[in-house]
Image (cartoon, grey):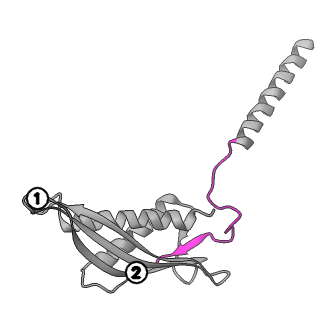
């Protein structure tokens, strides 16, 4: 009988320990006190004030992928979303990034400037709004892996990461 009581006490201690560990190290979530009512986000196709083909689609797709992978806000259509991320591509500019001694351009930076607004549709207020600029680089004449399109994709990836972080950072 005493042996059984010791086993039961041991099991109770084990259950208590596991319970405390689970509660202390439970699942982590970005949905916190700042915006607990925001569960979904709409990301409509960005506007484009440039003559570049396909950039607005690539940027919008990158943002949707980022939010899908991060998973704190579900992607929804505008009618069913709690929040919305809208934007406009303002400019895409090429600039010399580095120059050789004989004054040849060794690297070109492609700067992408976007205006973005993140809005809480439930409380009908703007959460944040800003102009974001990022760049990607390429080496002229270096072949397929180093092209202007790859530099634009690099800038888009940086913008996507910055927008995601800014959107969920207060959570």
Mark 2 secondary-structure assignment: loop
Label located before the other in sequence (1 or 2):
2
Position of residue 14 measured from the top left corner of the image (x, y, whole percent): 77, 27
Kindly identify which numbered label has been placed on residue 45.
2
Which quarter of the figure has residue 33?
Answer: bottom right
> Residue drawn at (77%, 31%), measured in percent from left and top?
17
Query: From the viewer's perspective, is 106 left or right of 31?
Result: left
Judging depth in this view, the residue of 139 and 41 nearest the camera is 139
User: Residue 8: which disc?
Assistant: none
Question: Would you place residue 55 above or below residue 12 in this image?
Answer: below
**Magenta stretch?**
25-45
**Extreme residue toward the left, this view:** 102
Q: Which mark is residue 143?
A: 1
Question: Along the line of sight, which residue is nearer the eye, 107 or 75?
Answer: 107
Position of residue 120 measured from the top left corner of the image (x, y, whole percent) = 61, 78
- 134 sits left or right of 84 in the view: left
Q: Residue at x 32, y 86 (%)?
A: 49
């Amino acid at each position: 009988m005493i042996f059984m009581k010791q086993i039961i006490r041991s099991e109770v201690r084990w259950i208590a320990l596991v319970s405390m560990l689970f509660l202390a190290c439970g699942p982590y979530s970005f949905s916190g006190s700042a915006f607990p009512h925001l569960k979904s986000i709409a990301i409509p196709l960005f506007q484009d004030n440039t003559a570049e083909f396909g950039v607005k689609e690539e940027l919008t797709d990158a943002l949707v992928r980022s939010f899908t992978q991060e998973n704190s806000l579900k992607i929804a259509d505008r009618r069913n979303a709690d929040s919305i991320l809208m934007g406009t591509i303002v400019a895409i500019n090429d600039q010399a990034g580095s120059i050789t001694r004989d004054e040849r351009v060794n690297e070109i930076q492609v700067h992408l400037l976007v205006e973005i607004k993140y809005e809480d549709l439930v409380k009908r207020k703007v959460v944040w709004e800003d102009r974001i600029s990022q760049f990607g680089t390429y080496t002229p004449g270096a072949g397929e892996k180093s092209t202007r399109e790859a530099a634009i994709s690099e800038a888009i990836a940086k913008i996507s990461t910055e927008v995601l972080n800014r959107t969920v950072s207060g959570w």
